[in-house]
Amino acid sequence: MSIYNISMTQIEAFLAVVRYRNLSRASKALYISHSTLIKKLKHMEQVLEFPLYTRGKQGIELTKEGAYLALHLTAVCEEYQKAVEYAKNIHTSIKQTMQFVVPSAFDADENFEMTAEIIREFGRAHPEILINMVLDSYSDLRQAVRMRTFDIAFAPDFVLSGLTGIETRPISNMKQYIAMSTKLQSARKKELDFKQLEDKVFYRILISDIDHERQMFFEECERYGFRPKQVDFINDFQTFMHNIKEGLGVSICGRVKNYDENVNIKYYPLPDSDDPPKVVAAFCGEQRTTAVQLFLDFYERYEEEQKESASAP
């Protein structure tokens, strides 16, 4: 077996099938014929020497090998795309480039929808600025902020806690949920009994200090009237979501959209807090560049327009 005989277009075809779980929809999404898609998948299976999927009554079902490969290839392709985009930015001649750092869950977590809209509107208002979006894990995002290798970081305020030399602007309040797979018996109930969570394993995405974060998490759970038996920390978003959807544990997190249309994750909203976590825009207070100031001026106008729109009869 030689993995070098597998092309990126074949990997792209496989991941499209993983996403849509339907060969016709996958081929349409890739703008290729059904037969071409099948050829790409068969070539991969021949090189790998194991089947990637089977066809069942419910549509495409991944084999265990295919599911494992899909999980890791998705992460690899995301890194590849980031590298290509960065190389393009180096090559592109443009007046100014801004580097925005966001969590790896940025495109999936509903808590970042307003942030995404603001970034899009800023890009439309300033086409002369090339926005380079970098998706990082929480720990890598903190490191980028600490090392000042960014223009603006958009993240939950608790991710940036304790970092010095930065200023922040609040973007939106975050809505938190108890997330669990519908495979779990607890998910069959309309309302969640917090006491039933005490025997569950909870997953959290690691930020920096495991011992400190574990203690803070236990204190958060106790405010809701329970203390879980165990909390495990995971570095990357893909593994985190995989463990939740497989019913290996539960989590307190935002609602994830469009992660996998074939897997149901139930979300129980947590009670509103007087001081909810917030998505913030962070920047270097000591070295505020012209581009950063441009964004802050734009955001100030955007906020004013939103307030006027909300108060209009």
Image: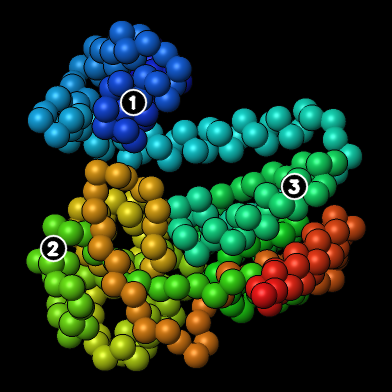
Which mark is first along the chain, 3 or 1? 1
The answer to whether residue 307 is above or below residue 265 is below
- Secondary structure category for the residue under label 1: helix
Q: Is residue 68 left or right of residue 293?
A: left
The residues bearing labels 1 and 3 have C-alpha atoms spaced at a distance of: 31 Å
Mark 1 neighbour class, 10 Å CA radius: few under 14, some 14 to 19, many 20 or more: some
> Can residue 254 be seen?
yes
Q: Secondary structure at mark 3?
A: helix
Amino acid carrying mark 1 in the image: Arg
Residue at x-position 20% and y-position 77%: 191
Q: Residue at x 67, y 58 (%)?
A: 118
| x then y, percent, for residue 111 | 50, 64
- Image quarter where the N terminus lies is top left
Q: Residues within 10 Å of mark 3 (few under 14, many from 20)?
A: some
Q: Amino acid at mark 2?
A: Leu
Distance from Cα at disc 3 to Cα at disc 2: 43 Å
| Mark 1 lies on residue | 25
Indicate which disc, 2 or 1, sits on the residue closer to the N terminus: 1
Amino acid type of the residue tagged 3 in the rendering? Gly
Res 211 seen here: no
The residue nearer to you, when weighing 104 against 26, is 26
| Residue that label 2 marks | 184
Question: Where is residue 54 shown, x and y percent of the image?
Answer: 15, 25
Q: Quadrant of residue 113?
A: bottom right
Q: CA distance from mark 2 to mark 1?
A: 30 Å
In the rendered image, which residue does mark 3 sit on?
123
Q: How is the image coloured?
A: rainbow
Between 138 and 36, the one lying in front of the other is: 36
- The residue lying furthest to the front in this view is 313
